[in-house]
Every structure is written in C-alpha cells, then in structure tokens.
Image: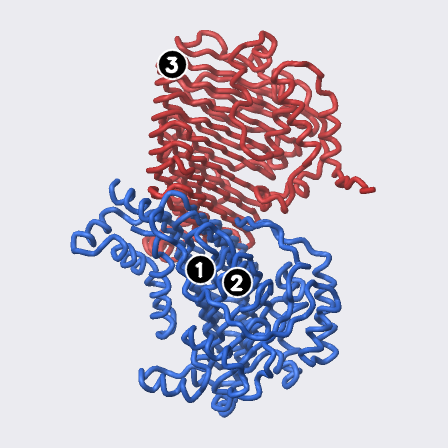
Amino acid sequence: MNADIRPIRTPAEQAILASLGGLPAGGDRLADLRRAAARSFEEHGLPHRRVEEWKYTDLRTLMREAVPLAGPAAVAQADAAARLLRGVEARRIVVANGAVVPELSDLAGLEEGLRLTTLSAALASGDEVLSRLGGILPGRYDASLALNTALAKDGVVIVVAPGAKIERPVHVAHVFAGESAAASYARSLVVVGAGASFTYAESFEGPQGLAYQANAATEFVVGDEAHLDVVRLQEDGAGAFHLATLLFDVGRQAQVHAFTLASGAAVARTSLYATLSGEGSAVGFNGASLLKDRQHNDATLFVDHQAPGCESRELFKTVLDDTSRGVFQGKIVVRQAAQKTDGRMMSRALLLGDDAEMDNKPELEIFADDVQCGHGATCGAIDDELLFYLRARGIPLTEAQSLLVQAFVGEAVETVEHDGLREALLERAEGWLKARG
Amino acid sequence: MPAVQETVDQVRSLDVDQYKYGFFTDIESEKAPKGLNEDTVRFISAKKDEPEWMLEWRLEAFRRWQTMQEPEWARVSYPRIDYQDLYYYSAPKRPTQLSIDDIDPEILKTYEKLGIPLRERDALLGIESTGGSKVAVDAVFDSVSVATTFKEELAKAGVIFMPISEAIREYPELVRKYLGSVVPVTDNYFATLNSAVFSDGSFVYVPKGVRCPMELSTYFRINERNTGQFERTLIIADEGAYVSYLEGCTAPQRDENQLHAAVVELVALADAEIKYSTVQNWYPGDKDGKGGIYNFVTKRGDCRGDRSKISWTQVETGSAITWKYPSCILRGDNSQGEFYSIAISNGYQQVDSGTKMIHLGKNTSSRIISKGIAAGHSDNTYRGLVSAHRKATGARNFTNCDSLLIGDKCGAHTVPYIESKNSSAQFEHEATTSKISDDQLFYCRQRGLDPEEATALIVNGFVKDVLQQLPMEFAVEAQKLIAVSLEGSVG
C-alpha cells in the first residue's frame, strides 16, 4: 500500500482552495476551463524555488497571507483611488477589485470598428468572441494564470475590427479599493483584427498600507498585419502582491510592442508569453523596474518563435535601491520551422543599494540553424567615471546619480510609441527618482 | 541558400561513424561481482588495501547515495541506468605499478595506439626529437592506474604525482585533509556514487613555492564491457605553487552505453595557480546514436587562498551524453577563475555543460569563454552560473557564450544564471547563436577550399580563443580532433 503523499498546504494555499470551492458546475467551455485550472492548482499548489520558472520568486514563501476574495468596491472610493495616467487623452475604463465600474468607465460613443464590453456582460450574453478566451495558454503550469482563469469573473473585452485604426488609446485602470486586504482577479481579452491598429494601456494602483493581492491576466490576439501597442504602469501599494500575466498570439507580419514600467507592490511578478505563429512579424517586449526598500520584482518572458522570419527585441532595465531584489528571466525559443529568426534580448541592472540583489536568467533555446540570436545581461553599480565627469562639472552627487539613472531608464521608456503615454511614464520615472532624493 | 543545402546534404551523405579509438584490448581482467551494494564498496576498499577511515567514508557515501534521486534538470535524455547491471571494479590481472616491465604488453600497446608513450625512455626520446617539453603521464585503465611516468624526477622537485589509491596509503594525512573538501560526499547523485566506488585516479601535491617542472597528464581508458569508470582526481597546489595538468579520455566502440562518473577536486592555496586542461574524446556512439559513454562528471576548483588562480580549459568532442560543469569557488581575495570551453556535438550526442563561478572573496574575477558547436541531430546546451555573494565586493565577471549550428536537425541552447548580491560586483554576459555565415563560406570556397575544409577553417577561427589557452601539445591534438569530430557533418 502506497500512502498518498499530500503536500503540506500553506495558509495561503488553503485560503485559495477555499475560494476555488465555490466554482459552479456549469457545462460550457469556460466552465470547463475554470475547473481544469482549479484542478491544476489543487495538484501543484503555489510554486516554490524548486519549480524552475519560479526559482527566484518563491510564491509559497512570499505569499504568506491568506486573504479572502475581494467584494465590490464603492464607486466614490474607486474613483478616488484611480489617479494614474489621468492626464493622458484616452478612453478610460476603471476596474476596481477585479470588476468593471460602469459609472467610472467611458463605455459609450465608441469609434467605428471598436467594440468594448465587460467580461461579465459577454459571459451573460454568451458573446461568441469568448471562444477566443483561454485560447493562448502557455505550455506549462503557471499558478498565477491558473488562479486567474479559475477565479476571474470580470474584466474588459475589446474587439478591434479588421482594418480599423483606433487613434485614441483605451486605458484600463485597475485599482484596489477597500479597508482590508483581499484578493482580486481580472481577466481581459483584446482581439485586434487583421490590418487594424490599436493602443492599449493599463495601470495598477491601490492603498499603500494593505497587503492586498491583485491578479490580472490579459490575452491579446493579434491578427495578420495588425499593429498593437501595450503600455503598462504598475504602481500597486507598497504592501501589495501583484501578479500579472500577458499572453500574445501574433499573426503574420504583425507588429506588437509592449512596455511595462513597474515601481509598485511588495512582491510583483509579470509573466509574458508570446507565440509568434505567423511569418515576418516584429515584436518588442520592453520594461523598466524601479525598486527600493524590500521590494521584489520579477519580469519573466517567454517568446516562442514558431514561424519563419520574425524579429523579436527585448530590453529590460532594472534599478535597485536599498535591499530590493530584481529578477529577469527571459527565454527565446526558436522552433525548427522558424528559420531566419532575428532575436535579441538584453537585461541591464543598476544596483544602487549595497544590499540589493539582481538575478538574471536569459535563455536561448534554438532548433533552427539559419538564425541570428543573442542575449546580453549586465549588472553593476553606476559607473564611477560617468559620475566623476558630471561632478567635475559642478553637479552635486545625488543630482548626478539621478541624471545617470534617468538616462539609464529613459533608454527603455523611449521605446513607447504613443507620445502622451511615453511622456506620462517618463514623468512617473522622474517622480520616483525625485522621491529617492 | 545553396551553401546551407549543401551542408545538409553532406550531413546526410557522410558517415558520422569515424571514431578512431574504438578498438578493444583483449586482456585478462579481474572484476568485482556485478551490481552495487555495501559488499561491492568493501571489495573495492579491500582491493586497494585502504585504511579503515577510507572504507567508512565510502560506506557513508554509499548509504547517502541510496537515499538520493538521479538529477533530471539537465537538457539530456537517456534510458534509466540500471546501477545493478554494471561492474564497478575491473583491473588488468597482471600486477601493476611495480615497474613498467610488469605491465601487460597489451596495455602498453593500447596506450601506444593512443599515442601516449608510457616508458620514460621512449617518452624522453620522442620528446627530445621534437624538442618539446616533458610530460609526466598517469595512465588509468578501467578501474586502476597502470603506470605513472617521471615519478622520480617529480619527487626531486617535491611534487607528489601518483595514483590516488597509493596516496591514500602513503600520504593519508594529506588525502584526508583535502578529499571531499571541494566536492563534498553529498554534493550530487553522481559525485556521491563516485565517492562510494571510486577505484583510482590521480593525486597531485605541489609543495609551497614549487613550480611543477613538467606538465602532468592522465590518460583515462575504459576497456571492459559493462564497466563503469569512477575515477577521482585530487590536485593540491600549496602556497605559491604552479601546476598544469592535462587529461585525456578514450574508450572502445560498443553498442551499450557505459557510465563514467568522475570527480575532480582542485585546491589552490594563496598565490597558487592550477591550470587544468581536458581533451575529452570518449566514444560518442555510432551514427544512429547507439552506444557511447555517459560522461557525468563533477569538477570543481577551490581558490582557497588569496591571489590564487584556477583555470579550466576543455575540449569536449566525445561521449554520448556530457553532463559536466567545471566550477571555481573564488574564496580568497583577489582570486581568479577561468573557464574556456569548446563543446562539439555531432550525431546524436547530447551535451549539457558549462561552469559555475562563485564569487565569495573581495576583488575576485572570472572569465568564461564557451564555444558550442552543434551538428547532426545533436543538442548542445551551455548552462552556467555566475554569482556574487554579499561580501564579494568588487567582483568582476565577463561571460561570452557563442553557439554555432551546422544543419537544421540540431539544437543549441544557452541557460545562464547570473546572480548578484553585491552592488559593486560587475557582471557582463553575452551570448549569440548563429550559423556559419554564407559570406565566409563563399569567401573561402572562392579561394579553392572545398566545403569541408572551408568549414573546418571557419570553425577553427570560431574556437581560436579557447584553443589558445591549451598547452601547445594539446592544442595541436585538439585542433585535429575538432576537424575529425566535424567530419561528415559539415559541408
């Protein structure tokens, strides 16, 4: 008789399992997806350092708090909480505690070719676009995504018609509004038709003192020759737990750019999965993280070149102050069919705090021979010679440092195409540096 | 892409199967009973006439090993090894180590075939005529060391160079002090297995301030069928000492897979330098991937003293599977670690190799140059770790990993881990993967080189940085080996 080996459940796992218990027994595809995700969580639980993809972000240890599912937020409270990117001319949707707040969202007067609805409404009406939901799944168990699949009830559903050029960005402002810590889950779907172009922005924020947990996942289905820009700003509260998953399926000759500026949350992990399934597309996945105190930030990328002739560029910058810890894991896979792939990945880290820690793991996995792939990773302190140069010209130390850090981060932020969003992000980065003093 | 197509055609049309060390020497040998249990461990220990502490050490390792799991994280796949279906000890029957004349002439012939003269007289003659430097050789045949040359000349300089089994008897205090101090008994599955059943290997001790007067070298040869080879090498360079050590390996051509699980430990005390070079050419299996050696090796150097230096250079062309990460622990302040590697895989070979540079002391520096070449149906992975601990102020690392793909059925992978816990540490890492450029090939062919020569020339250029690190005698051999390994794979 073999005794069943039951893993010891942490309090956080127990709380999550309790929330999973309430899943309805419905029969449609999404209900099946939810149950499958719940089962896989039951089987694997929270990942720990022995799980390779989570080696540097041991969720089992980091996620100590067991928090209940978040209830709906009061409109006034959500309105007060959503402050980021207000100055940017964009169509604004507020998602508070994982649910769209219609009173604060600009859902009317949509441009021609743009369809925008909520996940809950789409679910209620049996919208056929939901057949795309859950269509791009990573080939491996991802706890954060599994939980999102099982528990998210609302989010934004956007469909851009083929050929439509939507000038005005859609900005989805995720906020946590509440008095006590809770867990929120939001799931969004963005389908960009062939030849269309679209800019999607999202921001994350919440109260400073609460150990709330925000889990957001967005799937992007990008049609042939489409153009998609994704701009993200993560400033969750200092006690928060931020888990984000971005999934991209990129068609033929499409162009996709995604950028994340992250300076919030106590523990943050952003996983990006991109499948390049059509020939000749070009993607750029970039980011900058500004970390201080004991913050932990993990940017994990998985770019899968399945079709020939695609180009991918990744540039990640991490600034680490105090005792913060930054993680970059990037993997470029080039399948045998993906000849003529051109892939470049770069991660640079600047360690300002003596006790800061940076872990880089750039990976290449290549099965096609006619490729040009490379990656680079550096980490170190501010170059003394550069500092000396500035100080010799009468610039005080802190200002000189600040200038250099700004230039360092700026290189990544400059990749954002949309002028208004780029300016807003640069301003946020400057603000972070000023606060550092 | 005409040149690419041609390359692919060449891969198909030519035979990969050209291992020239595939012969088997028929000699009588004495073996331990098949299988692995405490009695096997006792048998080996008794055969070696070991002191009680050594037997205890082995038994402890064996007990620990029984509780361990075979590692699965490497990018290699192979059928499960039946550890009970192996011989753990095999020794030529004639007495060994008495004098060169007592060695079975068959073994001497084997080594001659391999191009390694064991007779000092011959060696000297051979070397004087070419005007090169002297090389002292320790030859390990299956489980035992059969000959060590130039022992006396080395002894004059105070250098101890002998089979480790002899060292355990003659210098127990030295062995006891250092054995397992770099690679602990419990380090990993294969190292623990090695600790339990290792039968021989080389022991080197270079005393304070001595520059070892010649290159030291070990040649490993697996001869018997179904036999695992578990050798253990321990090299200690005392304060201010210098030693350069070369290692070469071959095995007969067989259908079954054979296991080679070695452990190499290097200890460099203050101001000492150890240079360790390997040309690994175990039998890689035939063109269909049948047979070949499983090379599961743990190699680690400890820069224990300040300003010490350890340098690993490896040319990996053989083995069905290579699982090997020669590492440096940079413990002493201002210590240096280097890793230069050429890993060539062809046929169905699988290579998962790289290094670890662990920066612990202040102002430590390390350099990694890795060149991977994958051809045929092979998979070639670089896996490496560079880490700076909290106190490793001023640590520096430069890593460069380049991979070259020849043909579209092979894979090249890079998995570096770069961990910095000190803000003053400066790490730089770069990696590229590409194929041989059509322009370069065209340029060479225009000048009358055939595709194979052109590729060999370009590949040699690609690996030049590493070849330069090898001692002269080895560099020539390695260059030839690279050409042979790629034969039939390139156009």
Q: How far from the left and from the top, in percent, is residue A348?
A: 43, 47
Packing grade of label 3 (10 A; few <14, some 14-19, many >=20) is: some
Indicate the amino acid at tag 2: His
Residue wearing tag 2: B359
Query: Residue shown at 46%/14% (left/top)?
Result: A159
Q: Are marks 3 and 1 in contact (CB under 8 Å)?
A: no
Question: Is residue B405 toward the left or the right of residue A327 in the image?
Answer: left
Which subunit holds the residue at mark 2? B
Instruction: Check the image and report above or below for A130 versus B395.
Output: above
Query: Residue shown at 58%/45% (left/top)?
Result: A52
Which mark's residue is nearer the viewer, 3 or 1? 3
Q: How far from the left and from the top, in percent, is residue A426?
A: 41, 34
User: Which chain did the renderer colour blue?
Assistant: B
Indicate the amino acid at tag 3: Pro
- On the same chain: label 3 and label 1? no
**Visible in this render: residue A350?**
no
**Which hue is chain A drawn in?**
red
In this rendered view, identify the residue nearer to me: B110 or A262. B110
Which subunit holds the residue at mark 1? B
Name the secondary structure under disc 3: loop
Residue wearing tag 1: B397
Query: Residue shown at 27%/48% (left/top)?
Result: B437
Distance CA(mark 3)–CA(mark 1): 50 Å
Indicate the amino acid at tag 1: Asn
Residue wearing tag 3: A162
